[in-house]
Amino acid sequence: MAEIGDTGLNAKVLQLQSDPDNVEDVAKAHLLLGVEAERCMDWEAAADHYQRLIELAPKDKGVRYFGYNNRAYALLQLRRFAEAELHCVAAIEVDDDRHNAYKNIGLAYQALEQPATAAVCFIKAGFRNPADKRAWLHLQQLLSRTPDLLDDDPETVEAMEQLRKHYEVNGGVPGLN
């Protein structure tokens, strides 16, 4: 496992923590440390930094969202799917207009063997940010493994068709490699 590079952030966090009025700055520092840990594929450290951010309860909506969402992503990498689901729900409660938590909760539901719910989440992610095609690709992979998944779900089939049409109009439907 790669070690987190010495970015000086650890020292900065310690300095900031000595002043209780710096909650927002400390939260942002933990966000950056978590991102750095992810870059090094140190998922435990990333999850820990994001948990520390969450515990600080920053007022900044974006920082709070990414604390929950990024912790969920780290937990997915650690195969702690039920925990990841809970953090995705929290991220969506903070900001349900963003797509990443819907994509991540879709991955959690897929791993928890709830493919129909996963499909709905991937579709929601796709509508929230069609430029990020990963949710569509996850949906296609899910459907290739469970081709009869949507046989009895015309509402989800219709939503998927609307998303596919949106992709067609805006540069093409993403394909699997």
Image (cartoon, rainbow, N blue to C red):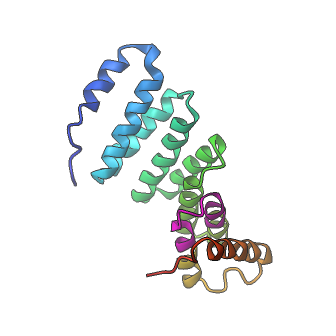
Q: Is residue 174 magenta?
A: no
Does residue 36 lie above or below 153 as drawn? Answer: above
Measuring from the top left, give residue 116's x and y in whole percent. 67, 71
Measuring from the top left, give residue 135's x and y in whole percent. 55, 66
Q: Quadrant of the N terminus?
A: bottom left
Does residue 154 lie above or below 63 as drawn? Answer: below
Tally the marks. 0
Q: Is residue 132 magenta?
A: yes
- Region in magenta: 122-138
Camera-side residue: 117 or 64? 64
Measuring from the top left, give residue 121's x and y in whole percent. 64, 63
The residue lying at 30 percent from left, 54 percent from top is 41
The residue lying at 41 percent from left, 38 percent from top is 31
The residue lying at 20 percent from left, 37 percent from top is 6
User: For residue 78, what is the image quadrant?
Assistant: bottom left
The residue lying at 53 percent from left, 28 percent from top is 58
Tell me: 168 left or right of 134.
right
Camera-side residue: 51 or 13? 13
